[in-house]
């Protein structure tokens, strides 16, 4: 098989992944809607937090908008994991294993669906932010950087979901892992900047929690403009998780596809 | 049998699971090119595990198997290139259309553009799914799914086809349509078919030779006719008019042969050599037992299974399903070293 066949395999598998994702409204709509609901609740209920001395902006909506991007990305773990588990349970993975499929093509193809959902979410959240008056201090390049960072975060969480599905072989494990990822979100700087969290243990957890840096990377582009340190930390945390989870998912796929 | 005529060969094939039973326990089999080999047994007997090993999806714990002349362990890719497989469940994506499935499968086998489209049209036509080609598979009936499954297995023109319980859950019409396609594949295209089934009729109708598997071992092998001839003797089943006469009916029939399972309201025996149905009728009449229904059964593959294992195949399915081999297969942690 020629090298181009890898591209062909990746192409059709990515298309399948995207098509499959888009044809499941029950998977797409909550992944877009729930972050917006949490955003509206937080920005309505916690607006007085902007009066705390040192709060970086006078609009809590602008502060909380970053949460929608990261929370949306968390849904990637659910959708990617559920799709992979479904392929295992239905035997579809076995069907693919009987073809000259390359594992790399399967992994890259799967990422297509994750990125498609991530793009829909990021564009929706940007649009909602723009409609409701959020300002993007870093301008259009900053907005595009937010999309890029969101996709990287989606990739990381998506691969975690795929890893769980490949290890466990069923959708129930994916559903079980989802709340754990949510806990990571709630134990971050999602509601307040880290320096304003008074509770010591919470501040320590939030400081060690990579989700905080993902949020702060996105937030910096909206509130402060170009902050190289926040961006570097955000991309490093998202990229690190994406790399580790991709390696873990690839390893789990190797175990799962035990063809000789 | 010359080596070039051998499509599938297994010697001492074993599969053990860490947390489960020895699913396949030393299977020897040979399937000639162009043959339809029926692998018959109840759920959990080891049929699917055997198919998974022969199709390279599961490494054997011990033993050797060659498919299309290639070792299933050392030459997995070559084996996969020569075979097509429709495994136990029609492994389809409910969110894709039939045509999208075909496009994916043709692309996986390196067919591009017009080549892939032509092959798609040809196969969808052959399995009668042209009109449903652009419908999502989630809305397909069981028979349509199985036909698409078969079309997908045939995309690359395999010489050997593995069909793992292809008609389970299908209505009689869909079952017969699939049988017709299997016959056409062997007659016209010379495809070797390895067919697992728990349906006696299916094995009887389709298979040139049958291997009966129970508890991971082949307990009988041969043509359906030869296996039935081996049993040789027919059985008689008599249902008395009065339920209270069942014990006496049993006693009378017992003079003519050994008990075999039958209807709960009837007595049934396999006739001993030399015993005739007329003798049974005369004996029942002499005892004054009124008979509501009297049947003479020619030997079936179920009788062969009963003779070899002491159990009826049709009753064995539930008992054997307690430790599902499929569950073990899906759990890679359960695989033996």
Image (cartoon, coloured by chain):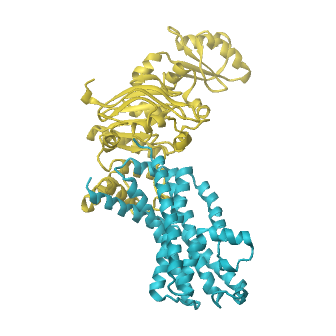
Chain colored yellow: B
Give the side of residue A190 with respect to residue B66, left or right.
Answer: right
Foreground pick, B84 / B65: B65
Hue used for the chain lettered A: cyan
Q: Nearer the viewer, residue A138 or B289?
A: A138
Where residue A164 sits in the image (x, y, percent)? 56, 55
Residue at (45% x, 21% y) in the render? B228
Q: Work out whether B142 lies above or below A10.
A: above
Residue A66, image quadrant? bottom right
Q: Give the x, y percent position of residue B215.
A: 54, 27
Side of B192 relative to A231 (left or right): left
Q: Quadrant of residue B225?
A: top left
**Which quarter of the figure is the C terminus of chain A placed in?**
top left
Q: Position of residue A161 (x, y in %)?
A: 55, 60
Let me know if residue A29 appears in the view. Answer: no
Number of marks: 0
Residue closest to the eye, B289 or B143: B143
Residue visible at 44% across and 26% down?
B27
Q: Where is residue A32 shown, x and y percent of the image? A: 57, 75
Res B53 seen here: yes
Q: Is residue B124 above or below residue B293?
A: below
């Amino acid at each position: 098989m020629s090298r181009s066949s890898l591209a062909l395999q990746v192409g059709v598998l990515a298309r399948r992944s995207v098509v499959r994702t888009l044809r499941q409204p029950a998977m797409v709509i909550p992944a877009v809607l729930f972050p917006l609901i949490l955003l509206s609740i937080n920005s309505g209920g916690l607006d007085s937090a902007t009066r705390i001395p040192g709060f970086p902006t006078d609009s809590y909506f602008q502060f909380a908008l970053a949460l929608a991007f990261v929370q949306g990305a968390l849904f990637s773990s659910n959708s990617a994991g559920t799709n992979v588990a479904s392929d295992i349970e239905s035997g579809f993975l076995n069907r693919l294993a009987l073809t000259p499929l390359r594992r790399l093509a399967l992994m890259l193809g799967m990422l297509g669906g994750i990125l498609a959902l991530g793009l829909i979410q990021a564009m929706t959240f940007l649009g909602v932010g723009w409609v409701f008056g959020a300002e993007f201090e870093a301008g259009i390049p900053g907005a595009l950087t937010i999309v890029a960072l969101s996709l990287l975060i989606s990739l990381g969480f998506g691969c975690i979901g795929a890893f769980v599905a490949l290890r466990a072989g069923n959708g129930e494990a994916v559903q079980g892992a989802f709340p754990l990822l949510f806990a990571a979100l709630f134990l971050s700087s999602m509601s307040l900047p880290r320096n304003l969290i008074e509770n010591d243990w919470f501040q320590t957890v939030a400081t060690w929690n990579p989700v905080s840096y993902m949020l702060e990377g996105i937030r910096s582009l909206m509130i402060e403009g170009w902050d190289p340190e926040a961006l570097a930390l955000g991309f490093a945390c998202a990229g690190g998780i994406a790399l580790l989870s991709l390696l873990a998912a690839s390893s789990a796929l190797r175990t799962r596809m035990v063809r000789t | 049998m010359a080596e070039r005529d051998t499509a599938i060969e297994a010697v001492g094939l074993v599969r053990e699971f860490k947390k489960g039973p020895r699913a396949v326990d030393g299977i020897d089999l040979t399937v000639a090119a162009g043959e339809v080999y029926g692998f018959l047994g109840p759920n959990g007997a080891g049929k699917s595990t055997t198919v998974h090993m022969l199709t390279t999806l599961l490494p054997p714990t011990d033993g050797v198997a060659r498919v299309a002349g290639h070792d299933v362990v050392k030459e997995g890719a070559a084996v996969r290139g020569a075979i097509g497989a429709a495994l136990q469940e029609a492994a389809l994506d409910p969110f894709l259309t039939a045509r999208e499935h075909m496009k994916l499968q043709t692309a996986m086998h390196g067919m591009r553009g017009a080549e892939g489209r032509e092959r798609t049209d040809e196969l969808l036509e052959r399995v009668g799914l042209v009109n449903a080609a652009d419908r999502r598979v989630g809305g397909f009936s069981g028979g349509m799914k199985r036909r698409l499954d078969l079309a997908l297995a045939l995309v690359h023109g395999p010489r050997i086809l593995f069909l793992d319980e292809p008609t389970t859950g299908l209505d009689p019409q869909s079952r017969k349509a699939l049988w017709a396609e299997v016959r056409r594949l062997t007659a016209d295209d010379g495809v070797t078919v390895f067919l697992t089934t728990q349906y006696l009729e299916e094995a009887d109708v389709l298979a040139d030779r049958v291997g009966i598997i129970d508890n991971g071992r082949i307990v009988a092998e041969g043509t359906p006719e030869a296996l039935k001839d081996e049993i040789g003797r027919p059985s008689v089943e008599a249902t008395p008019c009065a339920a209270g006469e069942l014990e006496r009916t049993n006693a009378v029939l017992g003079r003519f042969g050994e008990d075999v399972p039958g209807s709960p309201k009837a007595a049934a025996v396999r006739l001993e050599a030399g015993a005739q149905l007329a003798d049974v009728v005369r004996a029942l009449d002499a005892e004054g037992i009124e008979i509501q229904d009297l049947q003479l059964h020619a030997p079936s593959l179920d009788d062969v299974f009963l003779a070899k294992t002491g159990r009826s195949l049709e009753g064995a399915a539930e008992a054997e399903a307690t430790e599902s081999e499929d569950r073990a297969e899906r759990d890679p942690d359960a695989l033996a070293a």
